[in-house]
Amino acid sequence: MTFMKISQEQLAKSRVLVVGDVMLDRYWFGAVERISPEAPVPVVRVTREEERNGGAANVAYNVITLGAQASLLTVVGEDEASHKLEALVAGTGIQTHFGRHADLKTTVKLRVIGRQQQLLRLDFENTPTTELLASQTATFIDLLPSHHAVLFSDYGKGGLAHVSDMIERARAAGKPILIDPKGSDYARYQNATVITPNRAELQQVIGPWQDEADLQARVHALRQRHHIEAILLTRSEEGMTLFDEQGQLSVNAQAREVFDVTGAGDTVIATLAAMVAAGLSLRAAMPLANRAGGIVVGKFGTATVSYLELLA
């Protein structure tokens, strides 16, 4: 497949504003040598711990790894996890804009890994109040003019309660708006440039489809209902399909060994946003986003792709 070339210089000048739910991804790696005498579960003797950017922080990190610039606007708790996460994020070169509140618990996903596979995941979280989130709107308005694209990373943790208002402001400013959605209410994403659901997420909204013609009819009806310019459906081993005003365009999955799909959606939308911010159309950016997703599933955990890997 031939890709629309974009230079590192063009990418380096593009700025993406990432807004959404962040989390700290913790990994405990260990050896599994026996079953517990207390219950029929493996005993994991933890030998190594690792912490990574999660959620919207991983999306912003993907933008940075590609060689573009990223700002991250989010709300976290006043806790140990938030300070760990902010230090991790700051170390990547992402411009951080963290709102903090003592009543909020920063989301932590703890994965226990044994024998090269995930044995257990523990989630620590609560939902922020809308008053706290409203305070971020002023910062959003300040940041908007200096960015070329806005990416909303919705993990359903409450961080995007005011997304409709932010979309309207970004739209008025003429910025492309990319959304990684959550839930079945796409009315809140009205007037977005592109939304990137996977199959399960889209099925939640439009129901199961019979065939490609039925899928196309349902997606275009959804687009028109909510004034969404395009919907990019990520289809795992089937690649991805872009539905827009011109019809639909599909690309096949990049054939490679799948090691771990964690964070692949983050990489896809981050690549799409970085390329659109650098001046590519959605149709030209999609094959690059698809290739980036294919590379990242060959890595373990929340991972990223570099410019050189992408164009190798």
Image (spheres, rainbow, N blue to C red):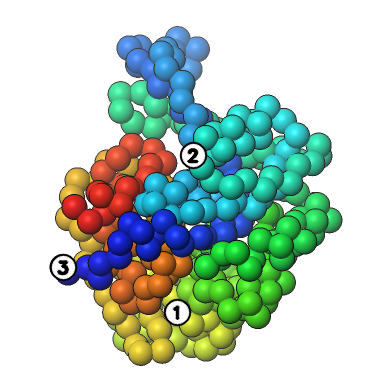
Q: Is residue 181 visible?
A: no
Tell which circle, 2 or 3, labels the residue nearer the N-terminal end. Answer: 3
Q: What kind of residue is marked 2? A: Thr
| In this view, the mark in front (2 or 3) | 2
Crowding around mark 2 (Cα neighbors within 10 Å: few <14, some 14 to 19, many 20+) is some
Q: What kind of residue is marked 1? A: Ala
In the picture, measured across the screen, residue 111 lies left or right of residue 233, that is right
* Residue labelled with disc 3: 1
In the foreground, 272 or 294? 272
Task: Give the vertical position of 41 relative to 6 (above or below).
Answer: above
* Cα–Cα gap, marks 1 and 3: 22 Å
In the foreground, 287 or 200? 287
Circle on res. 101? none
User: Disc 3 on helix, strand or loop?
Assistant: loop
Q: Residue at x 39, y 26 (%)?
A: 113
* Residue labelled with disc 2: 92
Q: What kind of residue is marked 3? A: Met
In the foreground, 144 or 7? 7
Query: At which x and y percent is residue 82?
Result: 66, 34
Q: Residue at x 52, y 60 (%)?
A: 16
In the foreground, 12 or 285? 12
Circle on res. 230? 1
Task: Give the vertical position of 13 relative to 79 (above or below).
Answer: below
Task: Give the vertical position of 53 relative to 95 (above or below).
Answer: above
Tell which circle, 1 or 3, labels the residue nearer the N-terminal end. Answer: 3
In the picture, measured across the screen, residue 38 lies left or right of residue 198, that is right
Q: Quadrant of residue 83?
A: top right
Query: At which x and y percent is residue 307?
Result: 30, 52
Q: Is residue 177 visible?
A: yes
